[in-house]
């Protein structure tokens, strides 16, 4: 009897856990739209146009999740968040996922109760300065007035870098990227610091972009990626495998234009990925063809990168580390099998 009761209790706990783990996915499906936290406006990553239509690298990740979960990349409610507001908004359930150029750190998982679902952009902190300063290295920036955004890892990294290299620093902290650019152009600071990808975007916002350069030095590791709340394993897996699906599609050559042909491919890896010979999508709580549907909607990882921030975009950032591992980069996804 005791063993039987223990089994019953164990089964009840498992059912309860499964019910809890499915909460966010069910909520999104019932609501019919994905609430996705993005930046308040960063060219190439997430920014609305004059008609309020959002675009960018992080935006396309939101659309990919919506395509996978709701079969429609347009069923997204974009929630613009400042660096200070982004994590509380996720913790409070105001957004289902945060896709906002955020760095994966131990504090953000251990202290804030978040989980990063993968690294979709390998970045690092750098510096932007006027070309008139005639500086070739960050080690020549002794006495600089540096503008940095509050609520970011850049604050601590900047202080550490100047202290370690025995250089004087005047730190000017501002709440957002627009304020950073304004303070810089108004002369409150002579240097901007944030992730290198953001510096390329901020330079485009300036009156004379060609009169400013990004110094080649990179002073930190900034692994960026989407984040979700802890305690919902199913939703964590969904967002994680959306990312891995986009990477595997890139590696296997499954593009937006070729996704229909991929459905009848003879390559077993491709057939599993697009759901022809697998039901992994259904095991995640989606449909077996969810990867095919999201690639058809927004393209694979490489297409998302090139369209928004790559050499064919206004930012013109080479893929570098963000190239697939088999082509010289370090982007690498677990196998879809």
Image: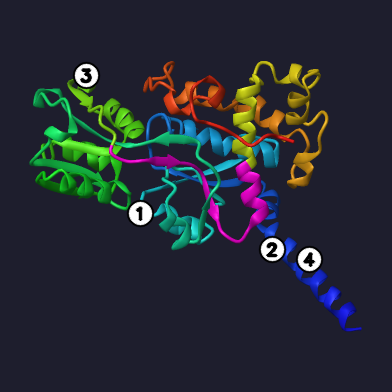
Give the residue pinned by disc 2.
20
Residue 265 percent across, percent down from the top left: 78, 18
Q: Earlier in the sequence, mark 2 or mark 3?
A: 2
Residue 44 percent across, percent down from the top left: 41, 29
Q: Residues within 10 Å of mark 2 (few under 14, many from 20)?
A: some
Q: Residues within 10 Å of mark 1 (few under 14, many from 20)?
A: some
* Distance CA(mark 1)–CA(mark 2): 29 Å
Residue 74 showing in the rendered view: no
Give the residue pinned by disc 1.
84
Splitting the image into 4 quarters, where does residue 61 fall? top right
Residue 143 sits above or below residue 24 on the image? above
Give the residue pinned by disc 4.
15
Foreground label between 1 and 2: 2
- Marks 4 and 3: in contact by CB < 8 Å? no
Residue 198 sits above or below residue 282 on the image? above
Residue 50 sits above or below residue 68 on the image? above
| Nearest the eye: 48 or 236 | 236
Q: Earlier in the sequence, mark 4 or mark 1?
A: 4
The residue stretch that appears in magenta: 219-240
Residue at 87% x, 79% y: name it: 3
Q: Earlier in the sequence, mark 3 or mark 4?
A: 4
């Amino acid at each position: 009897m005791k063993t039987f009761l223990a089994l019953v209790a164990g089964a009840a706990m498992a059912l309860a856990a499964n019910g809890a783990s499915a909460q966010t996915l069910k909520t999104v499906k019932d609501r019919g739209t994905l609430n996705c936290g993005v930046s308040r406006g960063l060219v190439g990553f997430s920014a609305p146009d004059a008609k309020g239509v959002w675009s960018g690298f992080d935006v396309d990740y939101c659309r990919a999740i919506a395509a996978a979960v709701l079969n429609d990349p347009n069923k997204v409610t974009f929630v613009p968040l400042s660096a200070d507001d982004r994590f509380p908004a996720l913790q409070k359930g105001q957004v289902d996922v945060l896709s906002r150029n955020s760095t994966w750190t131990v504090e953000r998982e251990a202290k804030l109760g978040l989980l990063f679902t993968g690294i979709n952009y390998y970045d690092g902190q750098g510096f932007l300065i006027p070309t008139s300063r005639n500086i070739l290295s960050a080690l020549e920036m002794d006495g600089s007035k540096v503008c940095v955004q509050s609520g970011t890892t850049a604050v601590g990294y900047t202080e550490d870098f100047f202290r370690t290299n025995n250089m004087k620093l005047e730190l000017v902290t501002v709440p957002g990227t627009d304020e950073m650019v304004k303070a810089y152009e108004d002369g409150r600071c002579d240097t901007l610091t944030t992730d290198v990808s953001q510096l390329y975007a901020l330079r485009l916002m300036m009156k004379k972009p060609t009169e400013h350069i990004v110094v080649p030095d990179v002073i930190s590791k900034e692994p960026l990626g989407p984040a979700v709340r802890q305690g919902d394993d199913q939703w964590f897996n969904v967002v994680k495998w959306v990312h891995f699906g986009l990477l595997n599609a890139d590696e296997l050559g499954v593009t937006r234009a070729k996704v229909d042909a991929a459905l009848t491919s003879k390559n077993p890896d491709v057939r599993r990925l697009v759901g022809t010979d697998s039901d992994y999508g259904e095991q995640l709580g989606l449909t077996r063809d969810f990867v095919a549907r999201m690639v058809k909607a927004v393209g694979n990882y490489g297409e998302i990168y090139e369209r928004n921030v790559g050499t064919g975009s206004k930012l013109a950032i080479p893929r570098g580390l963000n190239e697939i591992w088999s082509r010289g980069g370090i982007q690498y996804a677990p196998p879809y099998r």
